[in-house]
Image (cartoon, grey):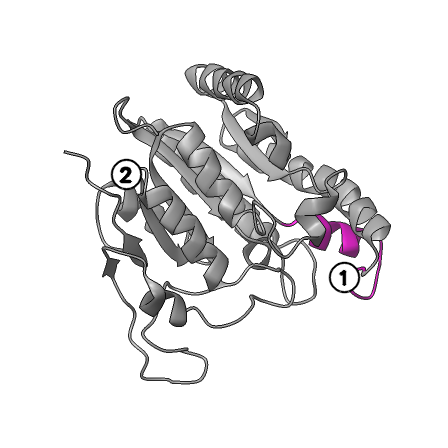
């Protein structure tokens, strides 16, 4: 789609998951917010354009509303998302401001990607924000989007697919998915202590999908399979995709320099 137009070599999309932004009690992990803001601000100071795709609205809203567990009804999930989104953006604004950065919020629905005029408007908005040195923070609009919360075949899939779509839309050179695991292993490291991290994958096929295992953490809904789907979508457009541990955001320094961190899924070479 963008092979003939090229990718922005200094543009990077970072996706952070619920398990990184919240602690075991389900509360906001303030240290994670701070460290992530510090690293992304620093990377922008190095000349990179940064877009952050953030999960966590429902989980943070669940905590804010003093619910004992993640709500099961659609209306309560959407209510929690609406409350949680305010809290998340407040924290991002606070911590990025500490590092002298301005952020912007962009909420997306699946329909936004299905109409060419909306896609063009979105692209123009992203480019305008990035040109002004603003860091866009993107989330699925969970408070109004029924299909994205409910559907098993949802387009975005816990913001992993959303991050790939944003990377393609913005023609980013790299997509980094911060997870609660170091990357893709040749076996489940929770069950097999001798499992080895796979550092580079050229093609995502059924053998790779078979390594993905089941669902994600109890606070988030995305597992490795949705991350592989996202990586497959992005790499098909030439975008290098890296899955690495969100507990170590400093690994982004190595990633932007072309160093090793997590699992690299190589973008398709169109030359």
Q: Residue 41: in sight, yes or no?
A: no
SS for tag 2? Answer: loop
128 is higher (above) or lower (below) than 20 = above
Q: Is 212 inside the magenta-drawn segment?
A: no
Position of residue 188 in the picture relative to residue 186 (left or right): right
Say which of 47 and 99 sits in front: 47
Q: Position of residue 130 (x, y in %)?
A: 44, 20
Q: Position of residue 55 (x, y in %)?
A: 60, 47
Position of residue 264 in the picture relative to residue 60 (left or right): left
Rendered-image quadrant of the C terminus = top left
Give the residue displayed 50% in from the left and 49% down from the top.
Answer: 160
- The quarter holding residue 91 reads top right
Look at discs 2 and 1 and give the one toward the viewer. 2
- The quarter holding residue 19 reads bottom right
Residue range (magenta):
56-71
Give the residue displayed 63% in from the left and 31% down from the top.
Answer: 111
Instruction: Tell me the crowding category of disc 1: few under 14, some 14 to 19, or many 20 or more residues within 10 angstroms, Cα based.
Output: some
Give the residue displayed 56% in from the left and 45% down from the top.
Answer: 156
Residue ID for mark 1: 70
Say which of 258 and 94 sits in front: 258
Residue ID for mark 2: 238
Give the residue displayed 56% in from the left and 66% down from the top.
Answer: 216
**CB within 8 Å, label 2 to label 1:** no
SS for tag 1? Answer: loop
């Amino acid at each position: 789609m963008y092979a003939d137009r090229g990718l922005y070599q200094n543009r990077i999309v970072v996706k952070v998951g619920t398990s990184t932004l919240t602690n075991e009690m389900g509360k906001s992990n303030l240290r994670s917010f701070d460290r992530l803001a510090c690293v992304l601000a620093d990377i922008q100071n190095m000349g990179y354009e940064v877009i952050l795709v953030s999960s966590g609205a429902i989980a943070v809203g669940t905590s804010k509303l003093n619910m004992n567990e993640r709500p099961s009804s659609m209306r309560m999930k959407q209510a929690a998302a609406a409350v949680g989104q305010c809290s998340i953006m407040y924290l991002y604004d606070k911590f990025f401001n500490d590092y002298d950065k301005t952020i912007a919020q962009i909420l997306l629905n699946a329909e936004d990607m299905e109409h060419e005029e909306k896609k063009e408007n979105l692209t123009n908005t992203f480019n305008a924000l990035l040109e002004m040195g603003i860091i866009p923070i993107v989330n699925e609009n969970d408070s109004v989007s029924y299909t994205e919360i409910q559907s098993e075949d949802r387009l975005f899939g816990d913001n992993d697919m959303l991050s790939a779509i944003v990377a393609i839309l913005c023609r980013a050179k790299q997509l980094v998915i911060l997870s609660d695991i170091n990357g893709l292993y040749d076996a489940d490291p929770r069950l097999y202590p001798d499992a080895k991290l796979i550092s580079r994958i050229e093609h995502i096929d059924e053998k790779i999908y078979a390594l993905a295992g089941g669902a994600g953490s109890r606070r988030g809904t995305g597992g490795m399979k949705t991350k592989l789907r996202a990586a497959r979508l992005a790499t098909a457009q030439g975008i290098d995709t890296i899955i690495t541990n969100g507990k170590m955001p400093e690994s982004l320094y190595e990633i932007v320099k072309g160093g090793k961190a997590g699992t690299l899924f190589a973008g398709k070479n169109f030359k």
